Image (spheres, helix red, strand yellow):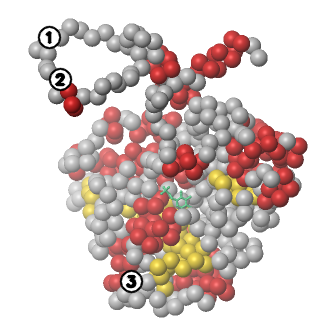
């Protein structure tokens, strides 16, 4: 290789301490114009604190280069299944950072924030309309927070009916891990429900699992296998007839928007992740919003606050925060993650009803395009039309060439693609869960497909290339267990 190019690559990857030059300064301090203060006693002082000595320009360049080593939806294709890393229009960020919105204070008198309350009220209306439910609270700060709210509402409902014996919740074996966690946090026992050979809920198992101790069922639709459960009407009916609450995990409504309303299918309560289905840059744990949306049975138990609208005698409108009749209380401080709510509002309002239905059309077509072009190169555990995501498997590749889903995912990084979700759902061996989203172009999907086919070929021809991947990143293959247990987060001097 060209030695100058080598040097450029090496320099770009240097840590801050390695860029340090003794005596170089980033700031010019003025002489003191106040009395100098004595240092604390010497036994409280550290001997030597190595600090990087760099100019301001160098430090800016260092952090900017670091940020470019990151994957992000603004840089790369990001088909991380169940996480919906779609492109978020910048307009929504602009609207939520308008000073009149961004600088509101939650303790301001209601009369001074009528515009903000009106937006929340209208967003509540959009969400009821989209899901076919009757009322919601925007307060939960994430999907898991919405789930916990829904489970606490379920508990409050049964207790109010004198049904304290309803103590267990059914959860399919394909469920997102937050579902059993939320049910357990609300004090329920979790009973796992198997899926049948087609990936739908096993109806016989369901029928034999209901009793007068059933509190409810938590189910994701489409399931995390990316499938629309063909038994869903029957599932809702069996649970309702047994007196249970049907909870819908609507974290990803991308496949249903404008086509199917969960309320029409028989769900009693759902949550939706505004940061996945709608818009909000997210990842690394936040930020988000997970409104909990209820039908008539659970509406009185919604968390507080909700926004209500009043029409005064002179015909003018007024909006206020209120608590539902038998509210479970607050899910956090104040009114929810207002910035995320605003982005979702802007997104829905910009698209309008036809645009919203267009999301589900494109999301489902994109996933099925990938399914049909890759089904001969990878295993397809459930060979049927998928919804907004497709779950492939590297099972045969592992048997034939010793290359697993992790190796495939790591190799994708070399081609500039974020790995898909791996090893989830748990019921698919060597799972690769791919969610292209509706915002990707035909060219990007074709590039991804070509890369996946190339990787399948590499697995056969040169498996070690995949075992050692990624090759072109600042850090190559890490020991992931060690990296999680003993993270190496800061520079240490050589011993
Ligand atoms: C992401 C997700 C959740 C949890 O949402 P958070 O906002 O991460 O708490 C729950 N269920 C499903 C199906 C999800 O994809």
Q: Earlier in the sequence, mark 3 or mark 1?
A: 1
* Residue highlighted by disc 2: 39
- Nearer the observer: mark 2 or 3; the answer is 2
Q: Earlier in the sequence, mark 2 or mark 3?
A: 2
- Residue 76: quadrant of the picture: top right
Q: Quadrant of the N terminus?
A: top right
Q: Residues within 10 Å of mark 2 (few under 14, many from 20)?
A: few
Q: Position of residue 334 (x, y in %)?
A: 28, 54
* Residue highlighted by disc 3: 158
- Residue 415: quadrant of the picture: top right
- For residue 289, say whether it is visible: yes
- Nearer the observer: mark 3 or 1; the answer is 1
Left or right? Give the position of 357 relative to 375: left
Q: Residues within 10 Å of mark 1 (few under 14, many from 20)?
A: few
Left or right? Give the position of 324 relative to 194: left
Q: Secondary structure at mark 2?
A: loop
Q: Position of residue 187 (x, y in %)?
A: 40, 76
Q: Earlier in the sequence, mark 2 or mark 1?
A: 1
Q: How much space separates mark 2 and mark 3, taking CA atoms?
A: 63 Å
Residue 311 or residue 449, whichever sits in front: 449
Looking at the picture, does residue 237 appear above or below residue 471? Answer: below
Q: Secondary structure at mark 3?
A: helix
Q: Secondary structure at mark 1?
A: loop
Residue 146 or residue 471, whichever sits in front: 471
* Residue highlighted by disc 1: 33
């Amino acid at each position: 290789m060209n030695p100058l190019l080598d040097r450029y690559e090496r320099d770009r990857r240097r840590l801050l301490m390695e860029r340090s030059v003794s005596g170089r300064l980033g700031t010019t301090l003025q002489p003191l114009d106040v009395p100098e203060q004595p240092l604390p006693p010497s036994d409280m002082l550290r001997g030597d604190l190595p600090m990087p000595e760099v100019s301001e320009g160098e430090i800016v360049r260092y952090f900017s280069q670091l940020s470019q080593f990151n994957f992000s939806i603004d840089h790369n294709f990001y088909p991380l299944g169940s996480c919906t890393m779609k492109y978020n229009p910048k307009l929504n960020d602009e609207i939520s950072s308008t000073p009149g919105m961004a600088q509101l204070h939650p303790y301001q008198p209601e009369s001074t924030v009528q515009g903000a309350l009106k937006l929340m009220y209208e967003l509540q209306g959009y969400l009821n309309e989209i899901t076919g439910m009757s009322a919601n609270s925007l307060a939960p700060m994430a999907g898991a927070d919405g789930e916990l709210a829904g489970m606490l509402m379920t508990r409050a409902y049964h207790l109010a009916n004198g049904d304290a014996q309803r103590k267990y919740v059914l959860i399919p074996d394909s469920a997102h891990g937050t579902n059993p966690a939320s049910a357990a946090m609300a004090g329920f026992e979790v009973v796992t429900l198997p899926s049948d050979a087609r990936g739908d809920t096993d109806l016989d198992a369901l029928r034999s699992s209901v009793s007068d101790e059933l509190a409810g069922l938590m189910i994701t639709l489409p399931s995390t296998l990316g499938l629309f459960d063909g038994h869903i009407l029957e599932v809702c009916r069996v649970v309702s007839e047994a007196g249970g609450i049907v909870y819908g995990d609507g974290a990803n409504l991308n496949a249903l928007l404008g086509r199917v309303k969960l309320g029409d299918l028989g769900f009693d309560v759902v949550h939706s992740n505004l940061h996945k289905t709608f818009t909000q840059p997210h990842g690394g744990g936040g930020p988000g919003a997970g409104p909990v949306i209820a039908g008539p049975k659970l509406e009185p138990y919604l968390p507080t606050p909700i926004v209500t609208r009043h029409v005064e005698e002179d015909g003018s409108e007024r909006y206020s925060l209120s608590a539902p009749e038998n509210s479970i209380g607050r899910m956090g401080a104040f009114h929810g993650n207002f910035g995320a709510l605003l982005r979702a509002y802007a997104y829905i309002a910009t698209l309008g009803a036809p645009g919203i239905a267009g999301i589900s059309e494109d999301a489902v077509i994109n996933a099925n395009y990938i399914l049909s072009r890759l089904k001969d190169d990878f295993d397809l555990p459930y060979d049927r039309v998928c919804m907004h995501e497709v779950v492939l498997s590297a099972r045969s590749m592992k048997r034939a060439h010793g290359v697993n889903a992790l190796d495939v995912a790591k190799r994708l990084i070399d081609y500039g693609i974020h790995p898909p979700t791996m090893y989830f759902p748990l019921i698919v061996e060597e799972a690769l869960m791919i969610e292209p989203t509706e915002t990707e172009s035909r060219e990007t999907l074709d590039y991804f497909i070509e890369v996946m086919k190339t990787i399948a070929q590499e697995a056969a021809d040169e498996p070690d290339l995949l075992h050692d991947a990624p090759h072109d990143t600042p850090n190559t293959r890490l020991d992931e267990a060690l990296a999680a247990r003993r993270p190496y987060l800061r520079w240490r001097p050589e011993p």
